[in-house]
Image (cartoon, rainbow, N blue to C red):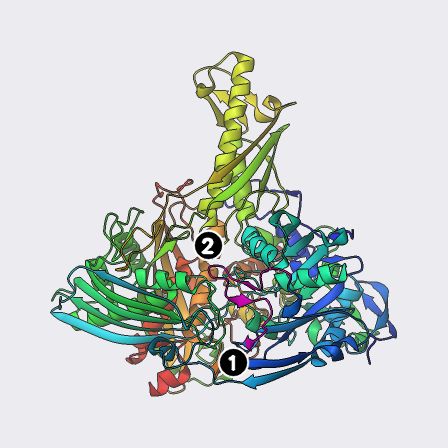
Amino acid sequence: MSAVVGTVTGERVAAGRLGESALRPDGIAKVQGSFQFSGDLSADGFLWGATLRSPHPYARIVRIDVSGAWKVNGVEAVITADDVPGVPTYGLIDQDQPVFASEFVRFVGEPVAAVAANHPDTCRRALEAIVVEYEVLEPLIDPERAIDGSHPPIHPAGNVFRHQRIVRGDQALQGAVVVEGTYELGMQDQAFLGLEAALAVPDPGGAGIELHVATQWLHEDRKQIAACLGLDDEKVRLVLGGVGGAFGAREDISLQVHTCLLALRTSRPVRMAYRRHESFLGHVHRHPCRIWMRHHADADGRLLRVEARFVFDGGAYASTSSAVLVNGITHAQGPYHCDNATVDGWAVRTNNLPCGAMRGFGVVQACFAHEAQMDKLAAAVGVEPLEIRLRNAMRTGDRLITGQVVESVAPVERLIRELAEMPLPTEPVGGHDLDPMRLPGGAGRTADVGDVVRGIGWAVSIKNLMYSEGFDDYSTARVRLADGVATVKFATAEVGQGFVTLAGQIARTVLGVDDVVLDRIDTQVGSAGSTSASRQTWMSGGAVDGACRLVRERLFEHVAAQHDLDAVQLAIDGTDVIDTVGTLRIPVAEATAGLVIDETFEHHHRPTEDLDENGQGNCHTAFAFAAHRAVVDVDPVLGLVKVVQVATVQDVGRALNPLSVTGQIEGGIAQGVGLAVMEEIIQVGGHVKNASFTDYLLPTFLDMPDVVIGLVEEPEPQAPLGAKGVGEPPTVSSTPAVVAAIRDAIGKDLVRVPVRPTDIVFG
Amino acid sequence: MSDPGNLVYTLHVNGAAREVRDAWVGESLLYVLRERLGLMGSKGACEQGECGSCSVLVDGNLVCSCLVLAAGAVGQEIVTIEGISPGAPSDVQQAFVDAGAVQCGFCTPGLVMAAHSLLERSPEPSELEIREELSGNICRCTGYGRIIDAVQRVAVARRGDA
């Protein structure tokens, strides 16, 4: 078997305990360029793999002729749907997506065939030599046609992924004040920097395979891959290749099955690596969404009833659309008290790009709409935006429109009050030095200071944490203590968020050791669930904490037996075991000499329930809250926007690593700002027009505003470490805050993100 | 042409002469550094010069190695992330770690190259200058705040050392 170069193992964790800004254990490797991302992995005698993709949004495959590819010198394998030995389809919730299209292609970019060859350029030429004859069909582009049934089914499972209503309370109730609007969000790309890449190494004789891959959830990948390969799960071993960002886009299968199939077919290691254009087609995106809302309030602006209709365009395959839908509709009220609701939600299939998870997962869409509505309500009642939010602020013990009681810490009022106290930018439009780089349009020197108007906007959010609707998304950790060194093993995907830092902090704190070694992240331990839904600090943190506590109990039993003490009176103090009622104090390293303690722990959150037909049920686990204020400068003539500052106060439970929390908040806001003013995958008739970093705009250093951060630390009783996930809330309410600020600047009713220059000038 | 190629040439990388064999003339400097010379520290994320992940120094100039043909870089001094500070991390590299400027780390080698280049040319850059000079490097994780802090830390420390 070939030697695999570059798996991450035996990483020593830098010092730091819970609550400290411990530094990343992989930091030095990353700044020196020696950290191995999945695309950097290689093996002796490897081949390159590449994928042929559909050029049509919807077509019938008449004929595939791969003979031309075989004539290209250097080609070792050519495979199509006929070469999938196991289940021909995969998917996170419904297995409706073909490994390779056979009868129909349903989106531009759908895989049709794959090749393995000796050079990426050989692969390219081989793909060009494959002839696919298509009968082009009329694509389903408009989600409303999926709902009204006017387009024939484009998939045997039909054109509707899920329809869910929420019906609560008085359905006829009309408020003294009524505000209404229709809102729209474009398709956002996660745009992680580290492109999809994997290395598959087959076992001798093809009995099994080892796949090194950048993913968010090793065990779920394994389940889907093994089914498609027709192998037992244990014959498929996954190892986490270094992950260059994820943000939801690595939750679904992309190149995993293809890479394994090529490796098994050729009996050689195979590397696959997408390029940027292919990446835009090859992973799921944030759902475009159209939302109508009507809010009813009393004369003082107290919310009485929310009506809403959500239409999520899920694209060609199911992915997580049904869960995104439920997240969206169950957050329709926002972080506000509301007793009555009438919500209609659809997630539908079209021939657009498939959509699934992205940071915020359905709640980004809901928040953009409900926060625009709250500003409308404030205007209708004649109070300030913050006042309307204070009057309606959700509290612990309030019920959601699903009937679920919010048991989480819910410091909404405190977030708003503390946000109001955050400092505003001290510099005027253009800055004291009037450097044109500070103006909307920047180096283009298009805006004159005198034309630029400043605006301020606010938004507040509620976001569920962990998975919902009865799913037990547990996490597993194994901790081994020997000679004063703790070795921690988990399958938690480190995608950049810093769980590897946190795991060491937990072990040092609970076990009183300085030395923590992180074992390789792979499937040789139980599942950790997905690195998504802001859940790993809570879930995998809980698993590492639980395993450490089991080890500590055994350590105390050992010390108690040796010193004739009662184990319950022992404690860890720094790096010592101490007797809390006596004088014993011995270093953990000394107490564990010659001893090996090895424990595994699974952390499960409390069970959740499905929604009933009226959308009622305790479907969520817990909630986190955030508030954002944006300051923008706008050139209303040219439609240019400069986001000057975003201030935020976030409910974090407990900041286990303040530097990591800062990084999550700043990075999340960057993605929220991107959605607000620039990021959108443009599709025309199902064809993607901007699948590159030249045309899909991402915030740069110059686009990113100053960020001012306040944390509310009220430890969450349900959470094993008191900490809530912090990754998603910054992305949820930063977008509506920026748009509210633009509205404030120019006085227009902007209803769509990203806000385009034409919306500002002509909207 | 169906073979990868049969070009032979020598590149000067990180102070050493490195022979490239069996290459195809169309290969970018990024591809040759990574796949033929095993220098995996330079990253490819857009391959059209938009993201800066592949930044290296060619004759002292910061360039995107994805946009340079490797065969065209013969006779020029190439410095990659592996050569910026062999062994112990540079002050810039250490500051990136200490300031929390690293998350997934994919953009990091390119940003370290860009930050070194900036501080060589402008030892005490203003915040706006940092933003403008580094705006050719995209980071999707951090929102840039901690990276700016890292660069400022180095500028302050170097001033103190001078």
Q: Which residue occupies 48% across, 43% down?
A: A541
* Residue drawn 54% across the image and 35% down it: A600
Residue B99 rendering spot, x and y as whole percentages: 55, 53
| The disc label shown at residue A58, or none | 1
Percent of width and height locating residue A628: 35, 62
Residue B68 appearing in the image: no
Q: Nearer the viewer, mark 2 or mark 1?
A: 1
Q: Is residue A222 above or below residue A375?
A: above
Q: Pinpoint residue A649: horizontal percent, then vertical percent.
A: 35, 56
Q: Secondary structure at mark 2?
A: helix
A625 lies left or right of A93:
left
Residue closest to the eye, B43 or A326: A326
Chain letter belonging to callout 2 = A
The amino acid sitting under disc 2 is Thr
Q: Which residues are magenta?
A: A85-104
Q: Amino acid at mark 1?
A: Tyr
Question: Mark 2 sits on what residue?
Answer: A662
The correct choice, above or below, for A324 with respect to A547 in the image is: below
Which of the marked residues, 2 or 1, is nearer the chain's N terminus? 1
Magenta span includes A377: no
